Image (cartoon, coloured by chain):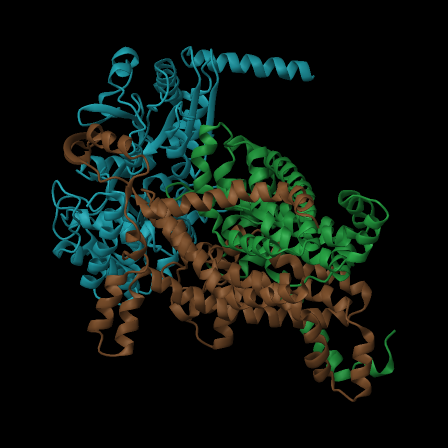
Chain colours: A brown, B green, C cyan
Amino acid sequence: MKHRTFFWFFLPTGLAMLLFIAAPIVSVVMQSVFAPHEAVLIEVENCTPLSGCTTETTIDQDATRDLRESAPLGRFVGLDVYLDRGHLAVSEFKEAWATAENWGQFFDSLGNLPFYRAMAFTLTFTFTVTPLLIALGLTIALAVNTLHRHLKGPLIFFSLLPMIVNPLLGSLILFWMIDSRGVLGSLIQYLANDPGLSLKASTPLMWISLIVYGVWHSAPFAFVVFYAGLQTLPQDQLEAAQIDGATRWQQVRFVIIPHLMPLMTFVALIQLMDNFRVLEPIVGFNASAHAQSLSWIILNDLSGETQQLSAASATSVLTIIGVAILLSPVLVRTWRDFKGKT
Amino acid sequence: MASKAQQMPTGLKITTFGFIAIWFIVASFPFFWTLWGSFKVELDFFSINDWTNALTGPRTEATYGTSFTGAGYEGAWIKEEFWKNVINTAIVCFFVVCTSLTIGTLGGYALSRSGFRYVFWLLMAALIFRAMPPVTLVSGYLLPFFEWNLWGKLPTTIIVLVAINQPFTLWMLHSFFQNIPKELDESAKVDGCTQFQAFRHVIVPVMWPGVITTGLFSFLLAYNDYAITTLLLSESNRTMVPAIAAFLGTTQTEGNVMFAVAAVVSAVAPLFILVMFFQRQIVSGLTAGAVKG
Amino acid sequence: MFLRSLATASSLAILSAGAIQACEIGARVSIVGNEFPAIQTVGAVAQECTGAEVKSNLTADHQKINLAGMQGNPAEYTTAIVANSSIVALINEDVIRPLDDLVAKHGDGLAKNQLITVNGKVMAVAFMANAQHLTYRQDLLEEAGVAVPTTYEEMLEAAKTIREKGILENPVGGPYAAGWNLAQEFNNMFLGYGGEHFKPGTAEPSVNSEAGVKTLEMMKALSEYMNPDYLTHDSNATSAEWKAGNVALMHMWGSRVGRLKDTGDGALEVVANNTAIAGPLTVGGGDIPASTLWWDGWTVAKNISDAEAEATFIAMKNGVSPEILGKPEVPEQAVWLIEGYQPTEAATGVFAAANSGTKPYPMLPYMGLLHTALGNELADFMQGKESAEQALKDVEAAYIAAAKEKGFL
């Protein structure tokens, strides 16, 4: 295709992404290296209803306004925000390294820093949920594929339900169902034979709940994609394998999975990215005492009484870098495929 | 079709069937539980005292005389005028799906038919764009949108949703188009068509399965989005999800959880019809152009 | 039929407009605020003004959009309804204007205690108040034979008795969910112990103090009598526990207690009828209640024309005029600071809080940052993962990083 033709075909989508994603990313990067001006503080008397007047501190707007007008972007702080305690925490990291007597102590000190605490959960979540949901999605797809065709239709719909029901309320309803007195919580207590068991009171159990929710919520996506892939499975290959005496398991292992490989890469790519940005279950389960993620930190910075734009921007940039590192093996593979094709 | 060698042994058949049954329960149980509970009062729905209350509904019976009540539905649909939000959602979804598929097919087609190196980098850029957490993107929009008087309006939100969904749409459609043989449009061009004519007359007729599948995912994204719609739409233009969130209340004031539950259950019904209607296309869609990573 | 109902509707509209004094404005008004019934009432009455358009956008996410919506010139919103915690962000960014001249011109009918002044200038007009205070189950306290507690120490004693007598396993409740709620509980208790969040006149934190440690120890002691899931219980979940009859004592938002006493909608009669309220508790022998006083009020944007500011002031004053109390449902919606308001039974707790010298939530430019830091770092201590001193050290470190970024340190 000619460059010119390509340009016109790509223009609308390119423009949309340029305006609404690329431009904001540039501004986010800018925001992460510029911080608000230093505030000039003064003490004043404030009066509020029912409680009278008190002396409090406030910002001297006249003095601050000049600063703002002379440099509207704020003060340039370079990578300071990235390196502070709320993010990479370089100095705290070094201190932990220097003072820790053993690995356990070192990880304890790291666990005290928000970024590393969030990374611990995010990575555990990403690397357990993604393989599990791919395996589950594949198994469901293989199983549904063997069903009678009249059963297939409704099952596809019901399998999609975890993805369709709005996560905002879906996680709230599950939050109540897994409560120690809810229907699932009671079931788990009965199965574990421990009437005091509560999923929400212990960190490991909360992590497991979040992981189970993550698999449950995303398995339908993998299922739909794999199920479709199974429809294109070349029958002659399968028959050839059967003639060679391959067991059912060997057929799956050596014929079906290689055929679905491109789809698995696609699902892995999308799901690694989405799981790395896990947010909704943490909010829905009120789980932030036990588990935090990078996206949760961003939301927390933006929704406090005072918005911390620079901090949220820096965490966002770190998220993008994290995703890029996570996906790099897949990207390298795609690059090779691409070069092989041209 | 099924040769004798493919016939499953009974043991495997039972295992498969058992697995499907378990998955069916796991996938749909929370929804059926919610459906059942949406006809109860809040105290029964959350049933902290005894989970069986959610099934039998003693408080509902004490209040309304029967163990089923439509109070949640009445409150959401009549008192809170949830239908307005449904209309807004319908508008948003319709235009998001149409726009996103129109510009996405053009872009995805171009990406699949051009072998230059920038295609790879454009695909990579799209992937990186998708990595950006939407919350941060939206907080960046607020100031310019207010400044240019674009904030709070449905078209603005539609365009933003389209743009944010583009990376996914592009990747998916790009893969679909790669599976449509290049020879088709090449030969049309040899016959004297321009690239666009080749696309219009040769590719469009065969692309529908892939487009419909991509459309389903675009639709679900627009339908379930919270982060963008809640911050970019004014109260009068709210779609369903922010309206449901508003039913839940805030720290200092109590909401109306049963309205939210009823609203969520009602929100699933149209999707049931939609999926039932398109399910053949969804599956055959992926079939026709198995996605490549 | 249609015509007749239309006529009835419009005559009703005229009647209700007549009931509230005529309100005539000459420029656009646009309101942004939180979404709950009391604010919806104020917004709806402000919209009854004639002469120009009054738009209203009430949403729980108001804090995320009000700043951006007032920074433009002209600002999209001519007024933001805020609380004492959220007005700070608007003052910090200098987007709201002093109201002294407007109060002088149109302020008749506003009570003196409605005017929020910062540095001698009126910056907001408050119309409702809120505070956390004690809520208790009369029947269960009687059954256990304990008096209504007035201090947290007594609350612990009462909880111990109730548990020992086997009446309830976890008699204490409270919105202790990690994050904003937990930090707010810390703030209440910390003020009760006489703590100061900052070194006077500076933005340096001083929560890592004796009062801070005592605060955390008291919170931990209380949590022993709470449901083990307490770190996931926000005020919605806490209310649900209360309604289920699982809690006998809790410190709760005044604005939510009315619904707990409501017998309709499936509530257990024994719970609703026995829910009683009292003022906030004190702690550690102090006489300042371990609670904070909150108000909600409206402001006027800076980046708008004077005509718009005047119209906004008139419309909003109309929204909080004493006449709104004439509608039957309105007095129950909030603890109003409007002249002529007769406190309902549910309002007594908030009034008791005000009368016993409860401190207002600090209106400091950097308080929000400390609140976020507290919410994020205290959960580790509550779970027994670290000591109180370490948790408070973490809070200060997290706050300092944020305050440096924001230019306060």
Is residue C373 left or right of B63 when viewed as pictured?
Answer: left
**Residue A150, quarter of the rendered image:** bottom right
**Residue B79, quarter of the rendered image:** top right
- x%, y% of residue B242? 52, 41
For the image, the number of numbered tags is: 0
**Toward the viewer: A12 or C293?**
A12
Is residue A85 left or right of A40 when viewed as pictured?
Answer: right
**Toward the viewer: A270 or B203?**
B203
- x%, y% of residue B57? 57, 54
Query: Could you tell me which residue is drawn at 66 percent across and 52 percent down?
Result: B111
Query: Could you tell me which residue is drawn at 30 percent across and 72 percent down?
Result: A107
> Is any atom of residue C125 visible in this view?
yes
Q: Residue furthest bottom?
A: A245
**Toward the viewer: B109 or B48?**
B109
Please, is residue B283 above or below residue B71 in the view? Answer: below
Q: Quadrant of the C terminus of chain A?
A: bottom right
Query: Could you tell me which residue is drawn at 79 percent across and 88 percent down?
Result: A244
- x%, y% of residue C21? 40, 12
- x%, y% of residue A11? 63, 42
Please, is residue B214 above or below residue A306 in the view? Answer: below
Is residue A168 left or right of A52 when viewed as pictured?
Answer: right
> Is any atom of residue B39 visible in this view?
no
